Structure formats: structure tokens, C-alpha cells
Image: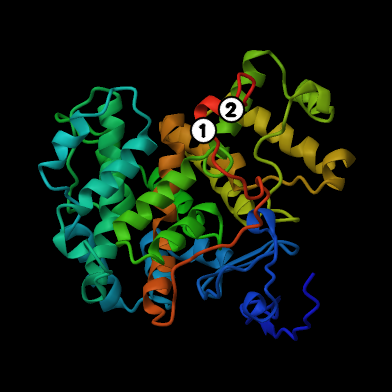
């Protein structure tokens, strides 16, 4: 047992959060820390997003999410996340021009879409096509191309929605709809999703704004599973598209990006059973029932998810303006009311999170469940790009390489096949 003593410095963040710097621990003592799932480990210092889960705070580059949701747009917020400041008029105009210039995929990419089966999951297509797209831009390959980073970032943000829309059309056996330069970012995505060759989709401002807000609210969320994956891959000097494709794969997991789909499936089950939510609430309080209240609680937030408050208001406004009725929304409101007043859920701090209402909004827009995580990926792209940029801008950075505690067999020696006996483990 190593008895060495080491004095470790305390790192204080700009919001006074504290961390113990253990970067010299192994070299000085021969020991490492063990933190399953990294729940207590800071993997980096980042200036992009700040979360205070106890107080229900989320800020992008210092700006409260409530202010950005009310006054900004997804594209302006994307610039903020990537470059650190709100853009000037000339900067946002140039960024918008780059998005328009790079919104079309290389024509040969169409043949890649044809190779997927009709029932392929859109997230599988998205990750594969982001990687494939990099092949058409030789400047991306090899070490990160800092001189053309602006173009690469704009190209990825622009083309991810084109790939997503094309994958949706492919899954439905529908003809591909190309982007239109006259439309802004979110409107263009809806156009590519729902227009027909003979008739453009009617772009209602309420719908465009609701989806733009979903993108904005998902744009970054600190070092979650997918963002950490992007940084891990980027640390090896993989290109931006490869790093983002890895982020898509991490996001695909049901414990990360699939929560809003799980909420809709839960609500559908409740409605189909004839329940108004009361029976489900009662069952969810009993472990033996196997029922789980989806869309409530959060790994980070021990208070009301600030994004959930924003998105609930938008949901109500969208349904009112479009004069929509959805039994799933009625049940969702009853579940929320019960969870916020029932001591069982209050004591466990199971407040609604952003996934609870985002799925209902997307369902109202007409986006199918299998596309929900894709929408999440489109929104998260600026945050991934911002984290990628932090990695490549750090000239002292090294490849990420976590350690482990080995718990396997101790040293042993090879036994010839004939000497292993009939009962040797397979």
C-alpha cells in the first residue's frame, strides 16, 4: 500500500464551483482514483455551458437559457456557443450565408441513402452519412484543419438537417426534397421534411418557432455522454465530422437521447388503456409494477429543469394557436400536476424535464417518434462543435486516455489444448 502524501491544488471555476486537481496523482503516488461512470470526475475545463442542478440554472456562455429562449434564435445561439460571444450583424450574415452555401449534399451521396433498408433507423443513417460526407471534403481528413474551421462548422450544422430530412423521406418511400435558399434554417428543415414535389409545405410561424426553440434548448448541456464522446474522439485529432458522428452514436442510446420518445410511448400506453393517468401514477410508486414515470427527474437537475418550464409554455401556445387537441397532452398535464403535488415524487425531486413536453410538440408538428432523437442531434450539433473547437484550440492538449482498476485473473500461463481436460471453462 502506497503511503505517499500529496498536496493537491483546488481549482475554482468562474461560478465558484470547486474541483480537486488530481493530474499529478499517479505520477507522485502510483495511485489513481476510481469513479465509475465519472459522476465525480471533471474531464476538462470548459467555457461553453454552466449548469447548477441544485438551483435549476442553465447558461450558455454566461447567458441564461431563459433570455436566449425568449430573444434569440437557434442559429444565433449556435454562433454564441461555437465562438463565445453573441454575433455582430455582419458575423451572423456571413454565418447564414455559409449555411446556405453548404446546405446541399454532394449528389453522389444520394446513392449512399439507397443502400440502407427502408426500415433503417434514422440515427444509424445520420451517423453513417455524416461520416460519409467527410469523404467529399479532402480538407477534413487527417489533422483538424483550423484554417477552414468556419466552413467545416457551417457545413456540418447545415448538412445535418439535410441528411436528417433525406433519411426521413427515404424511410417513407418519398422523393427527396432539396433545400431552398430563401428559407431560414429551421423553416428549410421543415420544408425538406414535409413538402411534396408539387406543393410546398405551409410554414406556420408558430410551428417554425416551436421547433427552432427545441433546437436551441438542446444546443448544449455540459459534459454529457455524447459531448464527452465528441471530445474523446476529437482528442485523437480525428476530424470534425468523425467526432460528430461518434456523438450521434452516443446520443442514440435510450438512456441519453431517447427519453422524449419514451415519454410519448408511455402516454400512448396510458391513453390506449383508458386510463386518465391516475392508475399509472399509483403504479409508478410501486417498484413491483414495473411502471416508470418517463420525462421526470434528471441526472443533473435536483430542481425543475429550466428548459422544461420554457418548453411547456411553448407547447401550450402552439396547441392554442393551431387549435389542436391531443389526448396525450391532457394526460401529460395530469401526470405533471400529480407529480408536482404528490409527496412521493416531490420528496424524490422528480420534476418534469425537457423531454416531457418536447415529444408532444414534435408529435403535434408531425414528426414521427423515430425522428425524435435525430431532432435532438440537430439541436446538439453546435455544442458538439464548440467542444470540438476547445479541443483543437488547446495546443497543450493530449489524447484522452482514462485509467482502470484491473479485476481480472492474475498472471497465468498457457495450457496446451490436450492438457486442458473436458471440464475446462468454455
- The location of residue 138, given as percent across then percent down, is 14, 60
Image spot of residue 334 (x, y percent): 73, 32
Residue 307 or residue 4, whichever sits in front:
4
Instruction: Out of 411 and 367, give the one closest to the viewer.
Output: 411
Q: How is the image coloured?
A: rainbow
Please name the residue shown 53% across and 74% down the image.
46
The residue at 33%/79% (across/down) is: 88
Most distant residue in the left direction:
107
- Left/right placement of residue 363 relative to residue 94 reads right
Q: Quadrant of residue 294?
A: top right
Mark 1 residue element: loop
Percent x, y of residue 81: 43, 69
Q: Residues within 10 Å of mark 2 (few under 14, many from 20)?
A: few
Q: Dot 2 corresponds to which residue? A: 420
Residue topped by disc 1: 416
Q: CA distance from mark 2 to mark 1?
A: 7 Å
Tag 2, which secondary structure? Answer: loop
Tell me how many marks there are: 2
Viewer-nearest residue: 374 or 217: 374
> What quarter of the picture does the C terminus occupy?
top right
Above or below: residue 134 compared with residue 123: below
Quadrant including the N terminus: bottom right
Which residue occupies 48% across, 46% down? 251
Q: Determine whether, in the image, residue 411 is placed left or right of residue 157.
A: right
User: Does the rendering let one see residue 241?
Assistant: yes
Q: Nearer the viewer, residue 22 or 84?
A: 22
Amino acid at each position: 500500500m502506497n503511503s505517499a502524501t500529496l498536496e493537491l491544488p483546488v481549482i475554482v471555476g468562474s461560478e465558484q464551483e470547486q474541483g480537486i486537481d488530481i493530474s499529478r496523482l499517479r505520477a507522485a503516488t502510483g495511485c489513481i482514483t476510481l469513479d465509475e461512470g465519472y459522476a465525480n470526475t471533471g474531464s476538462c475545463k470548459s467555457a461553453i455551458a454552466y449548469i447548477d442542478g441544485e438551483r435549476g440554472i442553465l447558461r450558455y456562455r454566461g447567458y441564461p437559457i431563459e433570455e436566449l429562449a425568449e430573444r434569440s434564435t437557434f442559429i444565433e445561439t449556435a454562433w454564441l456557443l461555437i465562438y463565445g460571444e453573441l454575433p455582430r450583424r455582419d458575423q451572423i450574415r456571413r454565418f447564414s450565408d455559409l449555411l446556405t452555401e453548404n446546405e446541399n449534399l454532394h449528389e453522389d451521396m444520394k446513392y449512399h441513402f439507397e443502400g440502407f433498408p427502408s426500415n433503417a433507423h434514422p440515427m444509424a443513417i445520420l451517423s453513417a452519412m455524416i461520416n460519409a460526407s467527410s469523404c467529399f471534403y479532402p480538407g477534413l481528413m487527417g489533422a483538424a484543419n483550423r484554417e477552414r474551421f468556419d466552413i467545416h462548422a457551417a457545413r456540418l450544422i447545415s448538412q445535418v438537417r439535410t441528411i436528417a430530412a433525406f433519411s426521413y423521406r427515404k424511410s417513407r418511400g418519398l422523393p427527396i426534397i432539396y433545400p431552398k435558399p430563401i428559407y431560414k434554417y429551421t423553416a428549410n428543415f421543415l420544408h425538406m421534411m414535409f413538402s411534396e414535389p408539387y406543393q410546398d409545405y405551409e410554414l406556420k410561424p408558430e410551428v417554425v418557432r416551436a421547433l427552432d426553440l427545441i433546437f436551441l434548448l438542446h444546443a448544449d448541456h455540459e459534459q454529457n455522454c455524447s459531448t464527452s464522446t465528441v471530445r474523446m474522439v476529437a482528442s485523437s485529432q480525428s476530424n470534425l465530422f468523425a467526432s460528430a458522428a461518434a456523438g450521434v452514436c452516443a446520443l442514440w442510446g435510450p438512456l441519453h437521447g431517447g427519453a422524449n420518445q419514451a415519454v410519448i410511448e408511455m402516454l400512448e400506453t396510458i391513453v390506449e388503456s383508458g386510463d386518465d393517468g391516475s392508475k399509472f401514477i399509483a403504479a409508478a410508486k410501486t417498484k413491483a409494477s414495473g411502471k416508470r414515470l418517463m420525462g421526470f427527474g434528471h441526472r443533473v437537475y435536483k430542481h425543475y429543469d429550466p428548459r422544461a418550464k420554457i418548453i411547456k409554455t411553448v407547447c401550450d401556445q402552439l396547441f392554442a394557436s393551431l387549435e389542436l387537441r391531443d389526448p396525450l397532452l391532457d394526460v401529460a398535464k395530469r401526470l405533471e400536476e400529480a407529480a408536482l403535488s404528490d409527496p412521493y415524487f416531490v420528496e424524490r425531486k422528480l420534476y418534469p424535464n425537457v423531454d416531457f413536453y418536447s415529444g408532444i410538440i414534435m408529435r403535434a408538428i408531425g414528426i414521427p417518434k423515430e425522428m425524435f432523437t435525430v431532432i435532438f442531434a440537430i439541436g446538439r450539433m453546435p455544442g458538439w462543435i464548440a467542444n470540438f473547437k476547445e479541443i483543437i484550440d488547446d495546443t497543450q492538449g493530449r489524447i484522452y486516455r482514462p485509467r482502470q482498476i484491473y479485476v481480472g485473473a492474475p498472471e497465468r500461463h498457457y495450457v496446451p489444448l490436450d492438457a486442458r481436460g473436458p471440464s475446462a471453462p468454455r
